Image: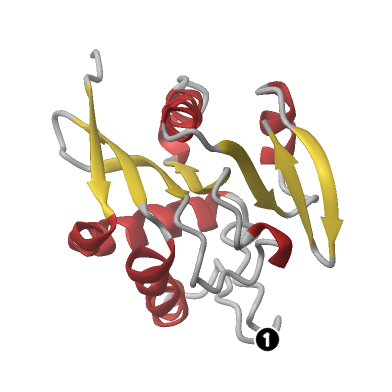
């Protein structure tokens, strides 16, 4: 069976219509990483949904949905999703954030927030069933090219302990800053 992918670009105001599908995607990623991504770093360990609990999705949704809604409404300027043509299910997502002025994004170093020449890659996730098929790479290339098209230097802030860090290095990323629990990577 050949999977045909549908790539959609969604501007920030329209992105809320995919919120429920994104929550399900992010929960599948959360399960596959044994609760390591998304980090849910604002929660105490005893609040984080345990993947072996029967109500894990309900608890995950309770904590993650307001955060995702904020990201879609207030932080991310463009979202790119990849759907499986047959099921129409979202199997990959990436966001870019380039209108940084007048935003508050706690993981972006303050000195970058007032600059017009940079943009950040955000929210990269691929459904665990579809990892290793080049979907993340395709999404990443779309984000890099879009930021360059806008005249922005692509950056990314992430956690240094994520498996994805090696992916970013393989894509040419260089760590340019360490800050608390984050690293900033330039491409």
Residue found 64% across the figure and 46% down from its top: 156
Q: Quadrant of residue 82?
A: top left
Left or right of 31 in this view: 162: right
Q: Residue at x 44, y 75 (%)?
A: 54
User: Which is nearer the eye, 101 or 80?
Assistant: 101
In the current view of this chain or complex, which residue is farthest to the top?
2
Q: How is the image coloured?
A: secondary structure
Residue 152 x/y as whole percent: 53, 37
- Left or right, 182 with respect to 71, comes to right
Q: Quadrant of residue 6?
A: top left
Q: Quadrant of residue 8?
A: top left
**What residue lies at 60% left-to-right and 78% top-to-bottom?**
48
Above or below residue 164? Residue 172 is above
* Secondary-structure class at tag 1: loop
Camera-side residue of 21 and 141: 141
Q: Residues within 10 Å of mark 1 (few under 14, many from 20)?
A: few
Q: How many marks on residues?
A: 1
Residue at x-position 57% and y-position 69% = 105
In the foreground, 72 or 134:
72
In which quadrant will I find the C terminus? top right
> Which residue position is annotated with label 1?
46
Residue 102 is situated, as x and y percent measured from the top left of the image, at 49, 72
Q: Tell me if residue 166 comes above or below residue 123 in the rendering.
A: above
Looking at this view, is 11 or 135 the one in front? 11
Q: Quadrant of the N terminus?
A: top left
Q: Position of residue 74 (x, y in %)?
A: 39, 70
């Amino acid at each position: 069976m050949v999977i045909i992918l549908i790539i959609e670009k969604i501007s920030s105001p329209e992105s809320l219509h995919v919120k429920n599908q994104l929550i399900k995607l992010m929960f599948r990623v959360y399960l596959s990483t044994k609760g390591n991504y998304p980090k849910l770093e604002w929660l105490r360990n005893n609040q984080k949904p345990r993947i072996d609990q029967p109500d894990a999705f309900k608890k995950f949704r309770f904590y993650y949905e307001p955060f995702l809604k904020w990201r879609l409404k207030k932080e991310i300027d463009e979202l790119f999703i990849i759907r499986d043509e047959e099921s129409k299910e979202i199997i990959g997502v990436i966001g870019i954030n380039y209108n940084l002025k007048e935003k508050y994004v706690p993981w972006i170093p303050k000195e970058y927030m007032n600059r017009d020449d940079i943009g950040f890659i955000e929210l990269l996730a691929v459904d665990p069933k579809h990892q290793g098929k080049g979907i993340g790479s395709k999404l990443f290339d779309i984000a890099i090219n879009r930021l360059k098209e806008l005249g922005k230097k692509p950056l990314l802030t992430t956690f240094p302990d994520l498996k994805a860090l090696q992916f970013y290095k393989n894509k040419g990323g260089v760590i340019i800053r360490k800050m608390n629990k984050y690293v900033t990577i330039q491409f």
